[in-house]
Amino acid sequence: MNYLHLGIDVAKLKLDVALLTDQGVHTAVFPNNSTGFRALEDWLRRWPQPLRVCLEATGSYSLGVASFLHQRQRLVSLVNPLAVHYFARTCLSRNKTDPHDALLIARYSQQYNPRPWTPPTLAQQRLQTLVRTREQILDSRMLVQQHLENAPAGAAVYFRAQLRQLQRQTEKVEQQIRQAWQAVPEMALAMSWLTSIPGIGEITAATILAILPPVEQMRSARQLAAFAGVSPCQKQSGNSPGRTRLSKLGHRRLRKALYWPAITALRCNPRAQALAQRLAEKGKRKMVIIGAVMRLLTHLIYGVLKNRHPFDPNYLQVPVAS
């Protein structure tokens, strides 16, 4: 099918759009709010042909317009901003403006036809909000703790009071996270599968469910590892073998959520321990081993969600490539 391609550059207050048609490029600017969404939809009705909409995944800024257009039966794709960034480099793009970025996104869509996006459910949106709120509270706690360590005696009492208040807020939001997934039977079932994996606790499991798209949209565990940015990436030049690192071209928050579970898995997950031993015998560094365990966890996560079954430590599987 011959589609028109619409690129949207999303900012906090506005949407720059560029539409590729047989007659050329059509551009416009709309407010990033419900009024602007309706005006954009009215503008698009001038072209009755099938349309693909593409925009970068920029969190809450892009979710509103993406959800609105999806509800209007538009074919919407949310893409990794890095994909557009590297596409711009292949085009030798020298400009960096919002209208130009919208045009680049439209051309990226035309070139690659990215996978359609499915919006999160209301339950998943609520879980996303609560998980993100908890992360922000923990970041504040870390900052206050740093101030406390360097504070004079007269100021320390105020920082300790802030830490107590933040601790209470952490406990409250964690209780709300627990209530959120317990209220949805399918989500509670998925939580039981995820927490059956040694190393993954309730908060990590809730974070995974808040971030991951439906597992049916992923073809393999490797695709989930790539989504999290824990796939191996090797740089080699000439006779130098280089070092293998995590690609980090995936979801930063999911990758961050898997770090401490990987540390825990090294103590209590037999498959992680066996993988770590093999890598240690090959002389791999500690961070390489942790990265490999993070990748192993994505494979186990994919397995329990795809098979709709708790983790079975005795199930024979092909080991994750070391």
Image (cartoon, helix red, strand yellow):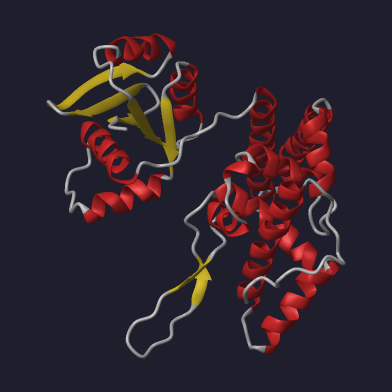
82 with respect to 173 (left or right):
left
Residue at the spot 28% in from the left edge and 40% down from the top edge: 110
2 with respect to 33 (left or right):
left
> Of 227 and 169, which appears nearest the observer?
227
> Of 56 and 51, which appears nearest the observer?
51
Which corner quadrant of the image does residue 89 belong to? bottom left
Residue 56 higher or lower than 64, as above or below: below
Residue at the spot 12% in from the left edge and 25% down from the top edge: 23
Which corner quadrant of the image does residue 175 belong to? top right
Q: Position of residue 22 (x, y in %)?
A: 15, 28
Residue 224 in view: yes
Q: Position of residue 155 (x, y in %)?
A: 69, 41
Q: Which quarter of the figure is the N terminus placed in?
A: top left
Residue 223 higher or lower than 57, as above or below: below
Residue at the spot 36% in from the left edge and 33% down from the top edge: 54
Q: Which quarter of the figure is the C terminus placed in?
A: bottom right
150 with respect to 85 (left or right):
right
Residue reaching furthest to the front: 1
Q: Position of residue 276 (x, y in %)?
A: 72, 77
Residue 148 higher or lower than 283, as above or below: above
Count of picture labels: 0
187 with respect to 75 (left or right):
right
Residue 155 in view: no
> Of 155 and 78, which appears nearest the observer?
78
Residue reaching furthest to the left: 23
Q: Position of residue 235 (x, y in %)?
A: 41, 75
